[in-house]
Amino acid sequence: MEVLAYSLSVLLGYLLGSIPTGFLVGKARGVDIRSSGSGNIGATNVFRVLGKTAGALVLLADALKGFLACFLAAHAVAAGLGLAPSSATREFLGMVAGGAAILGHNYTIWLRFKGGKGIATSAGVLVAWAPWALLVCLMVWLVVLGLGRYVSLASVAAAGCLPIAVGLLHGSRVMILITALIGALAIYKHKSNLQRLRQGTEHRLGSQPKAEPPKPTT
């Protein structure tokens, strides 16, 4: 029965996470977000291309995907299969579903497994799992963003401090391990941003992106 519960949690989390919110909002506005700005379907690019209202909508919706995956798996799946509603059962089912939701967002089946970077969805998962650790990471994100004005650098810094914050504030070894993997995945998904940071071509918040150098002709 527990195997079925975990399988359903993975499926539920992945399907919720894979809803390509940014792509759908862009389509509703007549824009293929994958062909605009950075080409990413996440909230940051939607903010940049479609404005604050659309960006805020995508940010909230992507976070909600992560939270709902954890909540539904921890309660609806466990109750539906008649599992004992212990805190450990709810926690583990929520962790599995939340991780699957992040993977669904990053590698959505609806866009040939190309998705976002998982920051907002991870935040939604942390609201359900580890809200105090999320608050610490948010503070790190705001400080780094304020100092450098790079959203990508702030996100990488927050991802790096995530397992440390979880370890200090929550203490579950399983949760520390899973959040370390989540943080590593978020950093990996920002590899192109890190490369642009090294090259000095990364977009800074509040400024226009630098033009790409012309490609040589043959």
Image (spheres, rainbow, N blue to C red):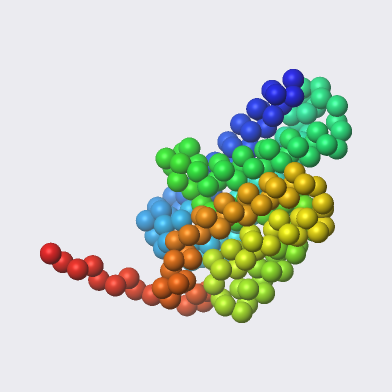
Residue 86: x and y in percent read 87, 33
Asked if 194 appears above or below 172 in the picture, the reply is: below
In the picture, the quarter occupied by the C terminus is bottom left
Could you tell me which residue is drawn at 57 percent across and 43 percent down? 103
Residue 192: x and y in percent read 44, 61
In the picture, the quarter occupied by the N terminus is top right
Could you tell me which residue is drawn at 80 percent across and 47 percent down? 172
Could you tell me which residue is drawn at 44 percent across and 50 percent down? 27
Residue 34: x and y in percent read 41, 53
Q: Determine the image quadrant of residue 216.
A: bottom left
Residue 180: x and y in percent read 66, 52
Q: Nearer the viewer, residue 186 or 62?
A: 186
Q: Determine the image quadrant of residue 88.
A: top right
Q: Residue furthest top?
A: 1
In the figure, is residue 15 to the left or right of 110?
right
Is residue 53 visible to the viewer in this orientation of the structure? no
Q: Nearer the viewer, residue 188 or 84?
A: 188
Q: How many marks?
A: 0
Could you tell me which residue is drawn at 58 percent across and 36 percent down? 15
Is residue 5 visible to the viewer in this orientation of the structure? yes
In the figure, is residue 121 to the left or right of 77?
left
Q: Nearer the viewer, residue 31 or 82?
A: 82
Q: Residue furthest left?
A: 218
